[in-house]
């Protein structure tokens, strides 16, 4: 065969291989979760694996696909979902590492660009297999009613009764819930600390909290370093006097987790706690009103 023809064949093979997607070495469906401890309105997938060396894991719906980069193929170790990961725009997505002995990090959140797959890289450097457990969670449509999204026009359609509206607002205040037709702002002094893996602790002082009608939340702390520590995200629920929000740091690190804000009956925030991670580093925060 002539060298020119051989060269053309090689190029053709390379082009074909470039467009054919890489197939998973291991693939399985997570079983249906039988536990009942997941809050109403929350979707959750717990992916548990035995990993030898290095793999890339993708989760789409309840299908877990694993590409082996080096070492033996990974094994399922009891993965389960209460609902499949949605194949559409996801609200309140969160990623947590529950168990690991090596490096594990989220490479990509589900989006239209990646066909709504969560992609995680695991690198297990110690010898033999290691157990890894990561959790994906999100808000489910049709779950707990979103009391902060109610439009003022809905109140007018309830009979346009100003007296009734005032009584409803007073009832909201007594329950410690968010007012349906008002933004929320709180600012005040306090003390606390935040601890970041590898960087130690820093003191927290004054805080500012803003929640708009669309459930968006901004929280900023004054610190002893002079640089504010700020978070932004979405309110995902209210339980008694406690607001729960899914937030991320407003910096390049983008550590993410659940923030809990406890309030008095007058709506004043008296405690804030947070446990956030990017899959490798972890940020713990605890603040109390002074």
Image (cartoon, helix red, strand yellow):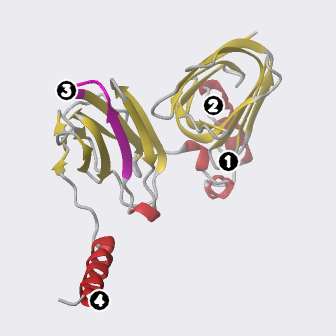
Give yes or no for contact between labels 1 and 3 (Cβ–Cβ under 8 Å).
no
Q: Against 81, is 89 above or below? A: below
Tell which circle, 3 or 2, labels the residue nearer the N-terminal end.
Answer: 3
Q: Could you say which disc has been placed on residue 128 in the image?
A: 3
- Out of 185 and 163, give the one closest to the viewer: 185
Tell which circle, 4 or 1, labels the residue nearer the N-terminal end.
Answer: 4
Say the numbered circle drawn on residue 4: 4
Where 34 falls versus 174 (above or below)? Answer: below
Residue 213 badge: 1
Q: Which mark is residue 171?
A: 2
Asked whether the residues under the numbered discs 4 and 2 touch, taking CB atoms below 8 Å apart as contact, a structural biologist would say no
Please state the horizontal and vertical placement of residue 279, each as a whole percent of the image: 45, 33
Q: Position of residue 150 (x, y in %)?
A: 60, 50
Q: Of discs 4 and 1, which sits in the foreground?
A: 4
The quadrant in which the C terminus is found is top right
- Secondary structure mainly formed by the magenta segment: strand
Residue at image x 27%, y 79%? 10
**Alpha carbon distance from label 2 to label 1:** 18 Å
């Amino acid at each position: 065969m002539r060298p020119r023809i051989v060269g053309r064949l090689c190029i053709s093979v390379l082009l074909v291989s470039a467009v054919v997607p890489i197939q998973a070495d291991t693939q399985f469906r997570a079983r249906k979760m039988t536990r009942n401890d997941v809050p109403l309105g929350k979707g959750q997938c717990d992916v548990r694996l035995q990993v030898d060396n290095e793999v890339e894991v993708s989760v789409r719906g309840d299908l877990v696909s694993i590409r082996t980069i080096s070492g033996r193929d990974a094994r399922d170790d009891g993965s389960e979902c209460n609902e499949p990961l949605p194949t559409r725009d996801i609200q309140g997505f969160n990623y947590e590492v529950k168990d690991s002995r090596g490096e594990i990090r989220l490479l990509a959140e589900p989006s239209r660009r990646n066909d709504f797959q969560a992609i995680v890289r695991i690198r297990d450097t110690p010898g033999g297999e290691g157990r890894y457990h990561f959790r994906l969670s999100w808000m489910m449509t049709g779950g707990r009613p979103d009391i902060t999204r109610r439009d003022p026009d809905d109140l007018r359609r309830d009979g346009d009764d100003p007296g009734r509206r005032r009584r409803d607002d007073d009832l909201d205040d007594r329950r410690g819930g968010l007012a349906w037709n008002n933004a929320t702002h709180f600012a005040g002094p306090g003390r606390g600390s935040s601890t970041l893996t590898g960087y130690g602790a820093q003191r927290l002082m004054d805080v500012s909290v803003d929640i708009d009608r669309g459930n968006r939340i901004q929280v900023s702390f004054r610190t002893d370093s002079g640089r504010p520590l700020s978070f932004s995200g979405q309110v995902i629920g209210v339980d008694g006097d406690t607001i729960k929000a899914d937030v991320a740091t407003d910096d390049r690190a983008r550590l993410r987790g659940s923030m809990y804000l406890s309030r008095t009956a007058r709506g004043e925030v008296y405690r804030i706690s947070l446990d956030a991670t990017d899959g490798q580093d972890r940020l713990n925060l605890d603040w109390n009103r002074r």
